[in-house]
Image: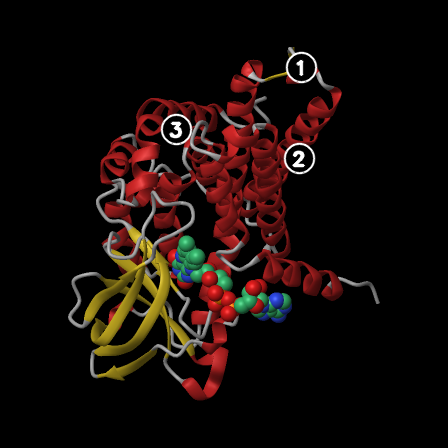
């Protein structure tokens, strides 16, 4: 189905599908086993122009938006949810600049992100602050024409691999969430280093690291917009990026169903193909229907965001909560259908199940997404 996609969006879908099939499929197991960062694939995606997708034309991008991002992420995730994150993590780090950057900040960073030469990351989470973004303890203190940042960030996607980091830090701890600010921090800045690398259950083709700021000197011009806007910058970033996590989940679910349909013909019980069983057909029917519903929701919400839709927090949260739950159900049911062959490395289903799990956790757990949806429903109550 082509939905309401333009010719250019269909071209992006075909291009990413081809790269995923031809270049990523042969190496996905390698990256899953080694947990190395897939530099070679990132280079291929950069050369194909896929980092340009969300960057405006005036900054050497293709002028697309969230819909283009979700199409590409879905296709890559169909084959590998980890490698797709090594790609899409840069969008999360770029949105604060796109949404809140000055002309000078955009001119400095966006063209090289578009070219795939600069990778980006987004750093909010700390040992004691995640869901409660207002509790960040990393501090930024103004000293002349610099800010001095001190603190530790945990679980940061693209950590060490990225060249620039959108970092959330407190400039006024007495003001809680209103005292938070956002900065663009370059990897080369004095006082910025990396701590522990995480060993993960899934998405092992991506890197997750601790960031350490020890009197890190950041030029004052790298403050995004103004002091005190960091919380809003973080929330607007998530509103824009959550359909991306949803599309990662969607791609993983679709990839599992695609592989299931290929290998089902080799599965027999009592001399009959199991695909002839109504019980199996009904399971597959539910999976396929939920995947289609997730895709329609994600594409519609992405288009709405790109058209400047207002109050997107609720619908953006809906994409992530729905698609990630679909991905967990789909991969779990397909592992069940393939029994021991689904649970072991005979087929990619166990990897897909491991990769799917994170989509219920990061960019705000699904509990937090349900809270966002619930709070907005109450706000919209008539009377
Ligand atoms: C592989 C990986 C990659 C990541 N990448 C990044 C990244 O690039 N950048 C970044 O900043 N972070 C990143 N994270 C962090 C991730 O976004 C957080 O772990 C996640 O948002 C949860 O935050 P927390 O761990 O601080 O949980 P907490 O905020 O400590 O919450 C603990 C638990 O309480 C629940 N909870 C909290 N408040 C409520 C409430 N009001 N109602 C109901 N339940 C509640 C939560 O759902 C959660 O289960 C990553 C994490 C992982 C595992």
Q: Residues within 10 Å of mark 2 (few under 14, many from 20)?
A: many
Of callouts 1 and 3, which one flags the residue occurring earlier in the amino acid sequence? 3
- The colouring scheme, among rainbow, by chain, secondary structure or one colour, is secondary structure
273 on left or right of 106: right
Q: Which mark is residue 290?
A: 2
What residue is pinned by disc 3?
16
What residue is pinned by disc 1?
270
Q: Between residues 297 and 39, which one lies in front from this camera angle? A: 39
Of callouts 1 and 2, which one flags the residue occurring earlier in the amino acid sequence? 1
Q: Position of residue 206 (x, y in %)?
A: 34, 47
Q: Position of residue 137 (x, y in %)?
A: 39, 79
The residue at the point 70 percent across, 31 percent down is 286
Picture quadrant of residue 141: bottom left
Tell me the distance, in whole angstroms, between the alpha carbons under discs 1 and 2. 30 Å
Point out the frontmost of discs 1 and 2: 1
In what element is the residue under mark 1? loop
The residue at the point 31 percent across, 76 percent down is 151
Q: Is residue 232 visible?
A: no
Of callouts 3 and 2, which one flags the residue occurring earlier in the amino acid sequence? 3
Q: Position of residue 20 (x, y in %)?
A: 37, 28
């Amino acid at each position: 189905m082509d939905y309401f996609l333009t010719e250019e969006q269909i071209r992006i879908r075909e291009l990413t599908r081809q790269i995923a099939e031809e270049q990523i499929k042969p190496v996905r197991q390698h990256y899953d086993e080694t947990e190395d960062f897939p530099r070679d694939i990132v280079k291929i995606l950069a050369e194909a122009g896929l980092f340009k997708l969300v960057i405006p034309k005036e900054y050497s991008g293709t002028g697309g938006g969230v819909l283009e991002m979700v199409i590409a992420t879905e296709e890559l995730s169909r084959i590998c949810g980890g490698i797709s994150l090594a790609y899409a993590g840069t969008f999360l780090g770029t949105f604060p600049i796109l949404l809140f950057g000055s002309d000078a900040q955009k001119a400095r960073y966006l063209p090289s992100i578009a070219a795939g030469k600069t990778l980006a990351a987004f750093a909010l989470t700390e040992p004691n602050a995640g869901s409660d973004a207002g509790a960040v303890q990393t501090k930024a203190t103004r000293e002349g024409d610099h800010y001095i940042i001190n603190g530790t960030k945990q679980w940061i996607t693209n950590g060490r691999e990225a060249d620039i980091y959108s970092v959330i830090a407190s400039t006024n701890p007495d003001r809680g969430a209103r005292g938070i600010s956002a900065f663009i921090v370059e990897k080369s800045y004095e006082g910025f280093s990396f701590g522990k690398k995480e060993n993960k259950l899934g998405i092992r083709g991506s890197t997750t690291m601790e960031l350490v700021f020890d009197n890190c000197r950041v030029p004052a011009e790298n403050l995004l917009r103004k002091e005190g806007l960091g919380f809003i910058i973080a929330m607007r970033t998530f509103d824009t990026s959550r359909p991306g996590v949803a599309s990662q989940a969607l791609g993983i679910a679709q990839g599992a169903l695609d592989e299931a349909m290929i290998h089902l013909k080799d599965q027999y019980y009592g001399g009959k193909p199991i695909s002839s069983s109504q019980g199996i057909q009904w399971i597959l029917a539910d999976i396929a229907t939920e995947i289609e519903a997730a895709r329609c929701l994600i594409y519609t919400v992405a288009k709405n965001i790109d058209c400047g839709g207002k109050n997107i927090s609720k619908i953006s949260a809906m994409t992530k909560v729905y698609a990630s739950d679909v991905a967990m159900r789909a991969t779990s049911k397909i592992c069940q259908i393939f029994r021991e062959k689904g649970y072991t490395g005979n087929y990619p289903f166990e990897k897909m199940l491991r990769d799917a799990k994170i989509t219920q956790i990061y960019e705000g757990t699904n509990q937090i997404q349900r809270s966002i949806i619930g709070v907005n429903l109450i706000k919209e109550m008539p009377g």
